[in-house]
Image (cartoon, grey):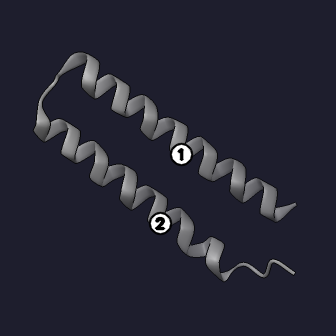
Amino acid sequence: MARSSVLILINYAYNFTLSLDHGALQNNNSTFVYIIVIILKVSTLLTLARPVRSFSWH
């Protein structure tokens, strides 16, 4: 149960950052904005992956 909810959360966060990517490319094709979005995506995924690693999968 906990495992699936964590995976859903990661999936939601990833889809959210994908929509941010799309918005940044659509509204402002600036490399600066794109870099910020990538940094946000990486930091979000790392933050979400940290508690997942400490989960007991057994």
Q: Rate crowding at label 2 as few (under 14), some (14 to 19) or many (20 or more) other CA atoms within 10 Å.
A: few
Helix, strand or loop for disc 1: helix
Position of residue 1 relative to residue 20, above or below, is: below
Helix, strand or loop for disc 2: helix
Q: Amino acid at mark 2?
A: Thr
Which quarter of the rendering shows the N terminus? bottom right
Residue at 17% x, 22% y: name it. 28
Position of residue 27 relative to residue 14, above or below, is: above
Which quarter of the rendering shows the C terminus? bottom right
Q: Amino acid at mark 1?
A: Ala
Residue 19 screen position, x and y as percent: 44, 29
Task: Identify the residue under disc 2.
Answer: 47
Left or right relative to 52: residue 16:
left
**Residue 54 vs residue 31, the one in the foreground:** 31
Left or right relative to 54: residue 39:
left
Task: Identify the residue under disc 1.
Answer: 13
Q: Quadrant of residue 24?
A: top left
Residue 38 screen position, x and y as percent: 30, 48
Q: Earlier in the sequence, mark 1 or mark 2?
A: 1
Left or right relative to 28: residue 53:
right
